[in-house]
């Protein structure tokens, strides 16, 4: 019995490895192949063109520059807020923290459209300003500027920085700064000598992570910036899909992969450093007392609400208000394909597609993710190796994944290019790390003595699995499932590559509708975005509710 | 030098200090002794300026210091967990207050060297504070708070996280050092042995007010009320209504007042050899139990009228269950209120 189970257990381990091999490593190799050997022989001309052309150097520099700017602004805003969150207790704090994290699960197309609704030419802000001051020009012109890209990046990453730094700050405590004040440090010296140096590890950690996210940002840059602000990601897409220069796209992908590899290495090293220094502290948040403290709390609340809620509310308002009245005709219009649209199906069918793919991807990601998590959890010589391996898809940009799919899986033995299956497969790949990261901490939290106690009391291995492990993991598996579903619903970069005419998903349809001429399409895209936002927000609330305090690494 | 009058403070609905008053003379070491949660740390934080919402007066040499912000008070505060700056070396930690004061670099180096010498850490200046032992951290924290020559030094359970043996040794060192510098100090602890060893005067706190403020000897010999007696661990405390035999003894000692609620038969006045100089009452008792404590025996006796007495004795007088003679010095019979 036992040998049978452990043998079939090892066989199970092959599943995630095979999946990763076929759908991740093989496409990556194909990218390398197409860029290094476009015609079967070693040919570095694509790379030569990259290095020789100022343009691509500029693309790389711009990618770094916008990521650095976005990171700096995010940290600048999140640091004082993290201090307020760690130091003070106030009504609605946990709700605010939850809300601030919402963007994390929102699809990029939705966020891009939300910002367009708020600050665009006919957006809420401009309409409001024009009406208020009876202006005949557009006061806020952020469309296709670097500024709007960076603001959207701050919107996305604010909560990540906030969470990392708040947690660290609370663990560091506030005794040392009180000690400094007693030794004669004024407010400014306390920031310079104590607070900032103390949270430096968290600041670095958050900074690198935000930089990584901004470096690989695709939807935001593509929709809000346009081709003028091409980052590596956008260039890969443009070269592969618009110009069909596959060797060049592949060369750019390799640059992207290597950059990400370097960044992830720095990040994991920094992360280890951060965990080393995390120690518990008895200091707890207290109510704000002085007027200055109350102002600090109030401005933090105001900043978060303004930055995070206003674009989403603007999107909602634009979608459901017509001429000042609540009007759901935008939503009803989703049932039909508007005239002149480049779409092949009615938007409503894309919703069905999305739901179908998300359910499939969720099931597959759960199955593979739980097996992979137990592989990582099982101590052994190889376990150390599995963890980074299964995290690789997270570190690879979605555009690279999608590009890899179309160059690798388009011919026998695996011709998925024309099949809709390619979409849920790509989503599974993207969702897999989320499932592992949700389940693994719960697995590690189960003390081995529990299982041993069960075994001593007479439970057979599979009985132990069902009666002890499964109930204890149930919650985290549900979190992983919700993550997988939400990630699949919102996935944009890879889907844009691999989706066929009939198998388009909601984010892809939103993007296509934006490209369509005419107001009807625009309204449809607004309605579609609101639906997608609601689905993702619902998934997010479920995750927040399911997640036991401190469990899960996202 | 420092004078507190009617200081009261509350955390929301929870009252932590109920209008207490306190005087500190120059160079005096005052211990705040009390169980955890009695408000002693809050009082320190108020004096330091770290707690804002309180009422009452705080004067230093006659001047109201309430409006003075923390960093300009010139008070030293040593935290319970030391609150050493983890990103600075031993030397940088000690130098911090001097830097903020604007001392010149050369002066700072000289002063830090002298302090390191004084707390027995000479040569450890470049060390990372994380690499220090508990006792060494304590010394760094002390040196750091002494460095800017504070007008008043406050110490919050400075020996709390050390093991018992080290605590006894450091308590003596600490007193010596404080007396040498001549800085007035407020020393918070919940350990009465530590308080006896360090303090010139001890203020026993409970539930936000000061129950008694006296020299260690006076406090031990004459606890002001039953509460203090209990906190000091004095045994043989009887409710007036409960024990007629104890009441009788108190009457004999002429200690009784109308309001008396408790009678304390102080263990120091109980002896088995009758050599006490003061007038004493003599009893026939039975030895109930004896526990060997090393330096002495803790014994428990039963007198007639069901009065149980506990005391210490160097030698065991007889076997358990056998009769023994007992002397109670009348001056050790105290009448106490709650």
Image (spheres, helix red, strand yellow):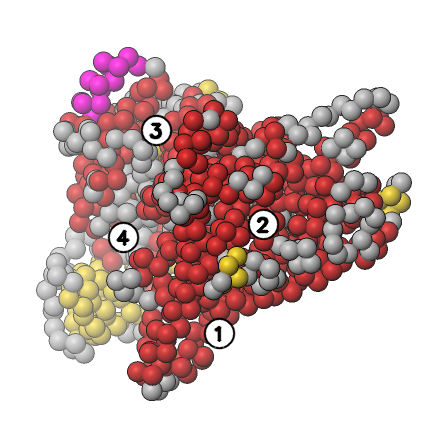
Q: Between tags 4 and 1, which lies in front?
A: 1
Q: CA distance from mark 4 to mark 1?
A: 69 Å
Q: Between tags 4 and 3, which lies in front?
A: 3
Front position in the image: A334 or A272: A334
Quarter of the image for the C terminus of chain B: give it. Answer: bottom left
Pick whichever of labels 4 and 3 is earlier in the sequence: 3
Mark 2, residue position? A497
Residue B268: quarter of image: bottom left
Q: Position of residue A179 (x, y in %)?
A: 37, 32
Q: Are marks 3 and 2 on the same chain?
A: no
Q: Are marks 4 and 3 in contact (CB under 8 Å)?
A: no
Q: Secondary structure at mark 4?
A: helix
Q: Position of residue A230 (x, y in %)?
A: 56, 33
Q: Secondary structure at mark 2?
A: helix
Mark 4, residue position? B331
Q: Position of residue A138 (x, y in %)?
A: 78, 24
Mark 1, residue position? A471
Q: Was residue A554 drawn as part of the magenta stretch in this picture?
A: no
Residues in magenta, as a range: B103-115
Pick whichever of labels 2 and 1 is earlier in the sequence: 1
The chain ID associated with circle 3 is B
Mark 4 residue crowding within 10 angstroms, few (<14) / some (14–19) / many (20+): some
Q: Secondary structure at mark 3?
A: strand
Q: CA distance from mark 2 to mark 1?
A: 39 Å
């Amino acid at each position: 019995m036992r040998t049978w189970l452990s043998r079939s257990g090892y066989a199970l381990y092959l599943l995630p490895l095979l999946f990763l091999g076929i759908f991740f490593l093989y496409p990556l190799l194909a990218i390398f192949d197409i860029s290094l050997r476009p015609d079967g022989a070693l040919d570095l001309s694509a790379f030569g063109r990259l290095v020789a052309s100022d343009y691509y150097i500029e693309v790389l520099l711009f990618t770094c520059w916008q990521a650095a700017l976005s990171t700096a602004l995010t940290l600048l805003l999140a640091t004082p807020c993290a201090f307020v969150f760690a130091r003070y207790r106030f009504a609605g704090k946990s709700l605010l923290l939850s809300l601030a994290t919402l963007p994390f699960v929102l699809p990029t197309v939705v966020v891009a459209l939300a910002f367009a609704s708020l600050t665009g030419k006919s957006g809420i802000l401009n309409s409001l300003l024009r009406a208020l001051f009876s202006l005949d020009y557009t006061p806020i012109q952020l469309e296709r500027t670097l500024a709007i890209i960076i603001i959207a990046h701050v919107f996305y990453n604010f909560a990540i920085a906030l969470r990392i730094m708040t947690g660290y700050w609370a663990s560091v405590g506030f005794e040392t700064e009180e000690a400094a004040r007693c030794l004669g440090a004024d407010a400014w010296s306390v920031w310079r000598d104590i607070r900032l140096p103390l949270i430096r590890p968290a600041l670095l950690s958050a900074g690198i992570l935000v930089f990584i996210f901004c470096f690989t940002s695709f939807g935001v840059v593509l929709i809000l910036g346009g081709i003028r602000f091409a980052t590596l990601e956008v260039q890969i897409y443009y070269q592969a899909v618009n110009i069909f220069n596959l060797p060049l796209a592949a060369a750019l992908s390799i640059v992207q992969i290597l950059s990400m590899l370097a960044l992830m290495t720095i990040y994991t090293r920094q992360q280890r450093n951060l965990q080393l220094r995390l120690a518990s502290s008895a200091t707890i948040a207290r109510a704000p007392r002085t007027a200055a403290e109350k102002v600090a709390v109030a401005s933090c609340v105001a900043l978060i609400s303004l930055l995070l809620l206003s674009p989403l509310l603007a999107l909602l308002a634009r979608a459901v208000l017509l001429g000042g009245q609540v009007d759901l005709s935008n939503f009803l219009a989703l049932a039909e394909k508007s005239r002149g649209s480049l779409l092949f199906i009615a938007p409503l069918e894309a919703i069905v597609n999305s739901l179908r793919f998300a359910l499939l991807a969720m099931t597959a990601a759960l199955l593979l993710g739980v097996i992979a998590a137990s592989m990582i959890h099982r101590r052994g010589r190889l376990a150390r190796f599995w963890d980074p391996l299964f995290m690789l898809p997270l570190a690879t940009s979605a555009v690279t994944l999608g590009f890899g799919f179309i160059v690798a899986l388009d011919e026998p033995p695996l011709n998925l290019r024309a099949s809709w299956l390619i979409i849920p497969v790509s989503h599974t790949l993207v969702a897999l790390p989320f499932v592992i990261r949700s389940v693994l901490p719960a697995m590690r939290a189960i003390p081995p003595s529990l299982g041993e106690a069960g075994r001593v009391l007479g439970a057979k291995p599979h009985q132990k699995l069902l009666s002890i492990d499964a109930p204890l993991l149930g919650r985290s598996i549900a979190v992983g499932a919700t993550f997988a579903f939400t990630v699949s619903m919102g996935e944009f970069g890879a889907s844009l590559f691999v989706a066929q005419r009939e198998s388009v998903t909601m984010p892809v349809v939103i993007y296509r509708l934006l490209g369509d001429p005419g107001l009807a399409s625009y309204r449809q895209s607004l309605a579609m975005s609101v639906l997608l936002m609601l689905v993702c927000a619902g998934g997010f609330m479920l995750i927040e509710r399911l997640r036991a305090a401190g469990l899960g690494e996202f | 030098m420092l004078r507190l009058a009617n200081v009261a403070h509350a955390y929301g609905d929870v009252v932590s200090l109920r209008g207490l008053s306190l005087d500190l003379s120059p160079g005096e070491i005052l211990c705040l002794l009390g169980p955890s949660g009695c408000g002693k740390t809050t009082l320190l934080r108020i004096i330091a300026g770290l707690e804002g919402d309180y009422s009452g007066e705080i004067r230093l040499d006659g001047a109201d210091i309430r409006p003075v912000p923390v960093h300009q008070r010139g008070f030293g505060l040593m935290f319970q967990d030391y609150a050493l700056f983890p990103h600075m070396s031993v030397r940088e930690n000690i130098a911090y207050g001097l830097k903020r004061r604007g001392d010149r670099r050369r002066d700072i180096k000289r002063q830090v060297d002298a302090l390191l010498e004084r707390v027995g850490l000479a040569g450890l200046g470049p060390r990372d504070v994380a690499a220090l032992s508990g006792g060494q951290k304590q010394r760094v924290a002390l040196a750091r708070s002494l460095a800017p020559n504070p007008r008043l030094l406050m110490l919050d359970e400075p020996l709390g996280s050390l093991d018992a043996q080290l605590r006894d040794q450091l308590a003596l060192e600490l007193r010596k050092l404080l007396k040498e510098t001549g800085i007035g100090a407020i020393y918070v602890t919940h350990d009465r042995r530590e308080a006896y060893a360090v303090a010139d005067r001890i203020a026993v706190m409970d539930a936000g007010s000061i129950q008694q403020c006296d020299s260690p000897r006076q406090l031990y010999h004459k606890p002001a009320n039953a509460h203090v007696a209990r906190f000091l661990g004095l045994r043989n405390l009887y409710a007036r209504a409960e024990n007629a035999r104890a009441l009788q003894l108190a009457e004999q000692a002429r200690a009784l007042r109308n309001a008396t609620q408790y009678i304390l038969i102080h263990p120091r006045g109980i002896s088995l050899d009758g050599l006490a100089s003061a007038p004493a009452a003599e009893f026939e008792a039975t030895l109930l139990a004896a526990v060997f404590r090393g330096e002495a025996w803790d014994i428990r006796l039963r007198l007639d009228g069901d009065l149980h007495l506990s005391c210490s004795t160097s030698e065991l007088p007889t076997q358990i269950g056998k009769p023994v003679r007992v002397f109670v010095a009348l001056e050790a019979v105290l009448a106490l209120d709650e």
